């Protein structure tokens, strides 16, 4: 919090914007005769923390939760089966039709056909990428 506050003050100073937070007068509030608690008056810095910083953090948390919901994470996981690293490696050799159903339904594809093509392409891709890698080494590109 302090580092962020210092960065904000430095930014304000650099752009000739006031970084002062005016203090408000604390208003007295009526209390019941047996009430022991008193209302605190927030300083300018504390008021900025409550009204801006916490509000921004709350908005960021909400955005992260909406972008990385369980459904989105499952979709991104299924998309990872089609990355070059996944195609080259042996990490996802046992992909089933059920594993890619959501991605296929998103794009209106038949999961069984996509699964079959993925398996065929994976074997071809491994051969092509290893031969391209060998040629690059022979040519001194690595």
Image (tube, rainbow, N blue to C red):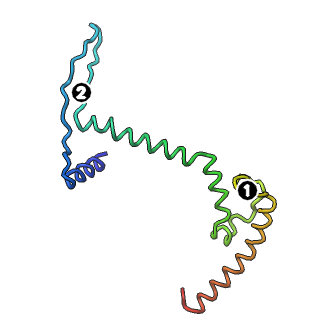
Pick the residue in front: 81 or 24. Answer: 24
- For label 1, the SS is helix
Q: Position of residue 133 (x, y in %)?
A: 62, 83
Q: Residue at x 25, y 50 (%)?
A: 6
Q: Quadrant of the C terminus?
A: bottom right
- For label 2, the SS is loop
The residue positioned farthest toward the top in the image shown: 33
Number of marks present in the image shown: 2
Answer with mark 1 or mark 2, whichever residue precedes in sequence: 2
Relative vertical location of residue 119 with respect to residue 139 in this rendering, above or below: above
Q: Position of residue 138 (x, y in %)?
A: 60, 92
In this orientation, does residue 141 appear?
yes
Taking the image as shown, residue 105 lies to the left or right of residue 27, namely right
Q: Residue at x 20, y 24 (%)?
A: 26
- Picture quadrant of residue 56: top left
Relative vertical location of residue 20 with respect to residue 83 in this rendering, above or below: above
- Picture quadrant of residue 30: top left
Do labels 1 and 2 touch, CB within 8 Å?
no
- Circle 1 is placed at which residue position? 104
- Circle 2 is placed at which residue position? 41
Q: Position of residue 22 (x, y in %)?
A: 18, 35
Taking the image as shown, residue 113 lies to the left or right of residue 29, namely right
CA gap between label 1 and label 2 equals 57 Å
Q: Residue at x 58, y 92 (%)?
A: 139
Taking the image as shown, residue 27 lies to the left or right of residue 75, namely left
Q: Position of residue 69 (x, y in %)?
A: 58, 45
Relative vertical location of residue 28 with respect to residue 87 in this rendering, above or below: above
Q: Nearer the viewer, mark 1 or mark 2?
A: 1
Q: Residue at x 64, y 56 (%)?
A: 77
Q: Which mark is residue 114?
A: none
In this orientation, does residue 99 appear?
no
Badge 2: residue crowd in 10 Å (few <14, some 14–19, many ≥20): some
């Amino acid at each position: 919090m302090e580092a962020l506050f210092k960065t904000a003050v430095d930014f304000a100073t650099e752009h000739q914007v006031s970084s002062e937070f005016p203090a408000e007068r604390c208003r007295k509030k009526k209390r019941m005769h047996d009430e022991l608690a008193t209302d605190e008056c927030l300083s300018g810095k504390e008021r900025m923390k409550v009204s801006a910083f916490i509000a921004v953090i709350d908005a960021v948390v909400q955005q992260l939760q909406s972008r990385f919901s369980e459904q989105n994470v499952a979709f991104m996981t299924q998309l990872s089966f089609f990355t070059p690293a996944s195609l080259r490696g042996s990490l996802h050799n046992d992909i089933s039709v059920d594993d890619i159903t959501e991605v296929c339904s998103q794009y209106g594809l038949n999961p069984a056909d996509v699964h079959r093509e993925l398996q065929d392409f994976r074997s071809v891709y491994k051969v092509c990428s290893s031969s391209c890698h060998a040629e690059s080494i022979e040519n001194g590109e690595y």
